[in-house]
Amino acid sequence: MGKIILRLDRMMADRKMSLNELSEKVGVSNVNLSKMKTGKISAIRFSTLEAICDVLNCQPGDILEYDPNAVSENNEE
C-alpha cells in the first residue's frame, strides 16, 4: 500500500511564505503546521486544508500527493 506525501513545504517556498506567516493567516498553530510540513500527521480537517489552499492560492492536489510505491509507517512490518 502506498503513502500520502505532504508537499506543504514546497508550496510555502513557492509562495515565499514563512511558517509563522502561514500560521497567522490560516489560524492554525505553528506546531501543527510544522507537523504538517514534515509529514508527521495522520489526518487533516477539510476546513484546515481549505484555509491553507485559500491562503496559498492552490489546490489540495498541490499539497497532497499519493505515492503508490512508498511504504506507509502504518504498513511497516
Image (spheres, grey):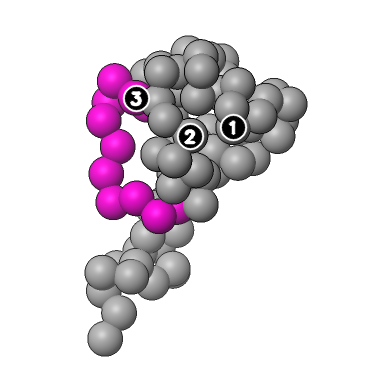
From the viewer's perspective, is the residue at label 3 or at label 2 nearer?
2
The disc placed on residue 19 is 1
Tell me which amino acid carries mark 1: Leu
Mark 1 near mark 3, Cβ–Cβ under 8 Å? no
Query: Whole-Å distance between the Cαs marked 3 and 2?
Result: 13 Å
Query: In the displayed structure, does residue 70 sit left or right of residue 48?
Result: right
From the viewer's perspective, is the residue at label 1 or at label 3 nearer?
1
Where residue 41 appears, x then y in whole percent?
Answer: 34, 50
Tell me which amino acid carries mark 3: Thr
Q: Is residue 47 magenta?
A: yes
Q: Residues within 10 Å of mark 3 (few under 14, many from 20)?
A: some
Name which quarter of the figure residue 29 lies in: top left
Q: Which mark is first along the chain, 3 or 1?
A: 1
Q: Secondary structure at mark 1?
A: helix
Highlighted magenta segment, given as a residue range: 39-49
Mark 2 near mark 1, Cβ–Cβ under 8 Å? yes
Q: Which mark is first along the chain, 1 or 2?
A: 1
Query: Whole-Å distance between the Cαs marked 2 and 1?
Result: 7 Å
The residue at which mark 2 appears reads as: 30
The residue at which mark 3 appears reads as: 48
**Which residue is nearer to you in this view: 22 or 63?**
22
Where residue 47 appears, x then y in whole percent?
Answer: 29, 20
